[in-house]
Image: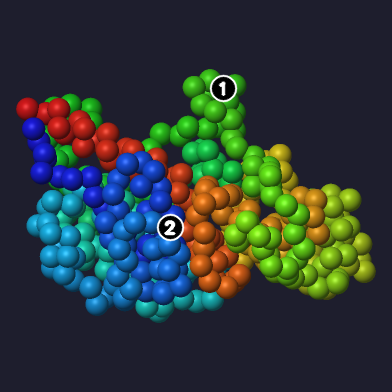
């Protein structure tokens, strides 16, 4: 049986608070090790997940140490996954960040892939790593990975995987070349692929798919909260930033006159928003509960940073509501200040998307096991 020495274990690089690891775990993969430089995010990880976290700069970590710690040899790991820090490639980043040291972290991912030689690799990031300012780095990194792995990548819509959010996300899958060659020998039509969508904005046209999940699920069965107040007992992370009186007036007006700031009268408009052709029209808007939410970012509990207003209450969404929109379960509790927890949620890979990838890799391993 091919690759019968492979146990279904994974390593999560740049693991943050654990969104990717939670999704892989839900797929049946044991994430034995996470690597994260931020202590607070690592605390959230260890509070919710069984795997160990190495708290260090990835540049200081060698494959030899990882393999020794896990008690395996190069080539025996099932999956190495990771989401290198992506802020420098985000469409929200206005500054020139070509010299930002974080740009090179994807090559630290490559280094560990090369030395650990996992059977499968998974990389997730913001779309502009492939299509925007990061595309030259992405090409260089994938050209290098292609020496050892057969790759595929594309930009997926989280809503197509049952996540109540239309966030676009870059996903890369890779299969080590020895395994890929065996699969191709058995089936000339085999190719590396990404997880199949489970949901659609047009379920009538796709009868085998479920309809998109709307943002309303984030607001069900939660008590009302006041902006800036602590989370109610029994509802961890159900808190959001306070609002200035002028912003309370704005959200109250928007609640009764439409869903975005374009309906605001002159006395409630910001001067910069009164100009023509001003971007970021979602700012100061409220979430439409009958549609998937917009992209959840680290600023999701700040009313002025996007369409993050609660549909009916005079406040921005809470960390808990943002976590639901990212597909975290309610028993996943984030550690840190309000701002730290919001950042952890916004930076996370949506668990349900990671779960779809995890199930794909398990399916491929099963196919390998069926080969003579």
Q: Which of the two discs, 1 and 2, sits closer to the camera?
A: 2
Is 362 positioned to the left or the right of 372 in the image?
Answer: right
Quadrant for the N terminus, please: top left
Residue at (59, 49) in percent of width and height? 325
What residue would you read off at disc 2? Answer: 48
Residue at (9, 57) in percent of width and height? 73
Is 343 positioned to the left or the right of 353 in the image?
Answer: right
Q: Mark 2 falls on what kind of element?
A: helix
What residue would you read off at disc 1? Answer: 205
Please state the horizontal and vertical placement of residue 78, each as a whole percent of the image.
21, 48
Is 122 positioned to the left or the right of 223 in the image?
Answer: left
Residue 341 shows in this picture = yes
Sequence-wise, the earlier of marks 1 and 2 is 2
Please state the horizontal and vertical placement of residue 32, each as a whole percent of the image.
27, 56
Name which quarter of the figure residue 232 lies in.
bottom right
Binning the other alpha carbons within 10 Å of mark 1 as few (below 14), some (14 to 19) or many (20 upward) gives few
Q: Mark 1 falls on what kind of element?
A: loop
Please state the horizontal and vertical placement of residue 288, each as a whole percent of the image.
73, 46
Please state the horizontal and vertical placement of residue 273, each as a whole percent of the image.
79, 67
Q: Nearer the viewer, residue 175 or 147?
A: 175
Is 90 positioned to the left or the right of 75 in the image?
Answer: right
Marks 1 & 2, CB-CB < 8 Å contact: no
Residue at (76, 54) in percent of width and height? 224
Residue 94 shows in this picture = no
């Amino acid at each position: 049986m091919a690759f019968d020495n492979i146990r279904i274990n994974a390593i999560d690089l740049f693991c943050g608070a654990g969104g990717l690891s939670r999704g892989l775990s839900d797929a049946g993969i044991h994430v034995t090790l996470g690597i994260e430089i931020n202590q607070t995010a690592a605390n959230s990880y260890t509070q919710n997940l069984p795997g160990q976290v190495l708290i260090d700069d990835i540049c200081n970590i060698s494959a030899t140490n990882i393999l020794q710690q896990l008690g395996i040899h190069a080539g025996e790991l099932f999956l190495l996954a990771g989401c290198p820090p992506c802020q420098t490639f985000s469409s929200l980043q206005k500054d020139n960040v070509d010299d930002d040291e974080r740009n090179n972290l994807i090559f630290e991912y490559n280094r560990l892939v090369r030395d650990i030689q996992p059977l499968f690799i998974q990389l997730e990031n913001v779309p502009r790593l492939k299509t925007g300012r990061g595309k030259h780095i992405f090409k260089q990194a994938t050209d290098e990975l292609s020496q050892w792995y057969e790759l595929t990548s594309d930009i997926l819509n989280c809503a197509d995987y049952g996540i109540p959010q239309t966030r676009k996300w870059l996903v890369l899958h890779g299969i080590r070349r020895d395994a890929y060659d065996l699969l191709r020998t058995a089936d000339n039509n085999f190719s590396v692929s990404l997880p199949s969508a489970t949901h659609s904005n047009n379920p009538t046209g796709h009868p085998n798919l479920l309809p998109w999940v709307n943002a309303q699920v984030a607001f069900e069965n939660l008590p009302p909260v006041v902006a800036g107040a602590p989370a109610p007992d029994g509802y961890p992370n159900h808190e959001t930033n306070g609002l200035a009186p002028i912003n309370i007036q704005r959200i109250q007006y928007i609640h009764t006159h439409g869903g975005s700031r374009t309906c605001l009268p002159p006395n409630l408009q910001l001067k910069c928003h009164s100009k023509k052709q001003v971007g970021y029209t979602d700012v100061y808007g409220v979430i439409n509960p009958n549609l998937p939410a917009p992209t959840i970012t680290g600023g999701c509990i700040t009313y002025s940073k996007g369409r993050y207003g609660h549909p009916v209450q005079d406040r921005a969404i809470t960390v808990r509501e943002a976590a639901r929109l990212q597909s975290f379960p309610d028993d996943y509790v984030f550690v840190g200040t309000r701002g730290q927890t919001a950042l952890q949620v916004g930076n996370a890979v949506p668990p349900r998307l990671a779960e779809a990838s995890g199930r794909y890799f398990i399916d491929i391993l099963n196919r390998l096991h069926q080969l003579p």
